[in-house]
Amino acid sequence: MDLLFATGNPKKSEELKSLLSLNQYNVLDLNDLNVKTEIEESGITLHENAIIKASFLFEHTGKTSLAEDSGLEVDVLDGEPGVFSARYAGIPKNDNKNTEKLLQNLKNIDNRAAQFRTVIALVSQNGVFTFEGIIRGKIIDKPKGDHGFGYDPVFVPDGYEQTFAELSSEIKNKISHRANAVKQLISFLTSNKHLL
């Protein structure tokens, strides 16, 4: 079954495709659909942005659509960068500058506890449904690893010694915030095929 995914980010798309393909779902993203429109993320929460993006794609195609919004939430920074994670250092979006700003804001601070949070929105003719995944961890002093994207090189998940950017995609796809949200999504899809 095809599921449309409102992202043009190939790394996010690849991650979701690998998680859902194991469950016989074929994910088509904006690039696959040749949709060139930049969907404005005007929400002030991850939930709002995920719904805005999924709703846009559903309205554009009339087919069941997914979107996700993720953010890094640092305890001592009152949840920053949060919904602004991708543009923390401004526009245009730049992962390295975002990470530099984060590390600067945490300079000389011992409490590095943080969490990644993902909200997935599914929009179909039967309504809007959301699924949330969280993974706790900590921010380290300098980036490590070549895999992943965003803040992955400075985030060490609880129970591990390596950053998300050092862990294999197999491990990350089992434990990540996105994987946790996708598990809920798959459970919902399996039980509610009549809603798609």
Image (cartoon, rainbow, N blue to C red):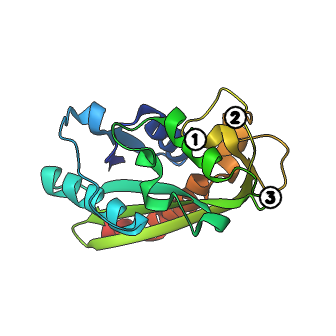
Disc on res. 99: 1
Callout 2 secondary element: loop
Q: Reading the chain from its start, which is encountered first: label 1 or label 3? A: 1
- State which mark lies toward you, 2 or 3: 3
Q: Is residue 104 left or right of 59 when viewed as pictured?
A: right
Q: Is residue 121 left or right of 56 when viewed as pictured?
A: right
Vertical placement of 94 versus 51: above or below? above
Foreground residue among 151 and 141? 141
Q: Which residue is mark 3?
A: 110
Q: Quadrant of residue 109?
A: bottom right
Structural crowding at the residue carrying mark 3, measured as other residues with C-alpha within 10 Å and reported as few (<14), some (14–19) or many (≥20): few
Tell me if label 1 and label 2 are in contact, CB under 8 Å: yes
> Who's the residue at 29% across and 32% down the image?
32
Q: Reading the chain from its start, which is encountered first: label 2 or label 3? A: 3
What residue type is disc 3 on? Asp
Callout 3 secondary element: loop
What residue type is disc 2 on? Pro
Q: Which residue is mark 2?
A: 143
Q: Residue 7, can we see it? A: yes
> Who's the residue at 19% across and 37% down the image?
35
Question: Percent x, y for residue 15?
Answer: 53, 40
Q: Residue 25, can we see it? A: no
Structural crowding at the residue carrying mark 1, measured as other residues with C-alpha within 10 Å and reported as few (<14), some (14–19) or many (≥20): many
